Image (tube, rainbow, N blue to C red):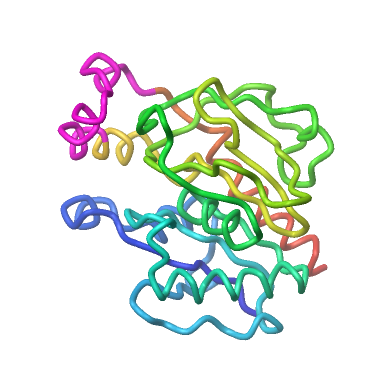
Amino acid sequence: MQKIIIKTGRTYPALAAQLGDFEDWIERELGAAPGEWRVVDVQRGEALPPVADCAGAVLTGSPAMVSDYEDWSVSTAAWLREAVQGNVPLLGICYGHQLLADALGGTVGYHPLGPEAGVVDIKLLPEARQDPLLAGLPAAFPAAVIHWQSVTALPPGAVRLAANDFEANHAFRLGSAWGVQFHPEFDSAAMAAYLSHLAPALQAAGTTAEALHQPLRPTPHAAGLLQRFARLLAHQAA
């Protein structure tokens, strides 16, 4: 049975040359051994394995927009629906979170207040206290965010797990699938690089210069979500 990282996009080249790409950061926070997780680059046309051969999957973020419905994204959404029907554990991050929501019957679009960027506080909702992945996390914890689009309506039957004052759907679960709008794989270096690289676009969208230059905070609880997911898979396999 394969554990896969579904690569839906890539970071910008200068940052990749310095720190690696999304899948590298995810593998680091999973605590993965070399070769333990197979990377499938769906944005570049790589085929996903049969759902029956998959023990679990993490979906990366992407500069792409779910609402553009590119062919590779639409075909990945169909695979995700089959995976949820087959009770394959999934964890979608940012674009992956939005793609899961859209694939399962929710809606995704641009946030009316513009982008959310930097390190923000995520607040767990009461439903998270019994959640297999989020239970035991602090009631509020810092996490890295950078997104223009959001899940504007959750899929039917989904459980909303986390929010903040800006973003109503920072985490949800539907069956075996979890989505998180924030980035558990980002460390401070990655977040700082994104804020610097995207500063002109963020300011054009209404983000203040003061917000872009706020000191970054460590995000250990957000990062720990990936190891929690790895433990969930290990427990299921035992």
User: Left of 113 or right of it: where is 92?
Assistant: right
Residue 201 colored magenta?
A: yes
For this orientation, the residue located farthest to the top is: 210
Instruction: Please state the horizontal and vertical placement of residue 93, each as a whole percent of the image.
Output: 51, 51
> Observer-nearest residue: 14 or 104?
104
User: Which residue is at a point 37% across and 40% down the rendered structure image?
Assistant: 148
The quarter holding residue 169 reads top right
User: Which residue is at a point 38% across and 81% down the rendered structure image?
Assistant: 45
Instruction: Please state the horizontal and vertical placement of residue 35, each as a whole percent of the image.
Output: 49, 74
Instruction: Please state the horizontal and vertical placement of residue 103, each as a whole percent of the image.
Output: 59, 63
Instruction: Please state the horizontal and vertical placement of residue 116, each as a whole percent of the image.
Output: 39, 31
> Observer-nearest residue: 164 or 20?
164
Residues shaded magenta: 195-216
The quarter holding residue 203 reads top left
Residue 11 colored magenta?
A: no
The tally of labels here is: 0
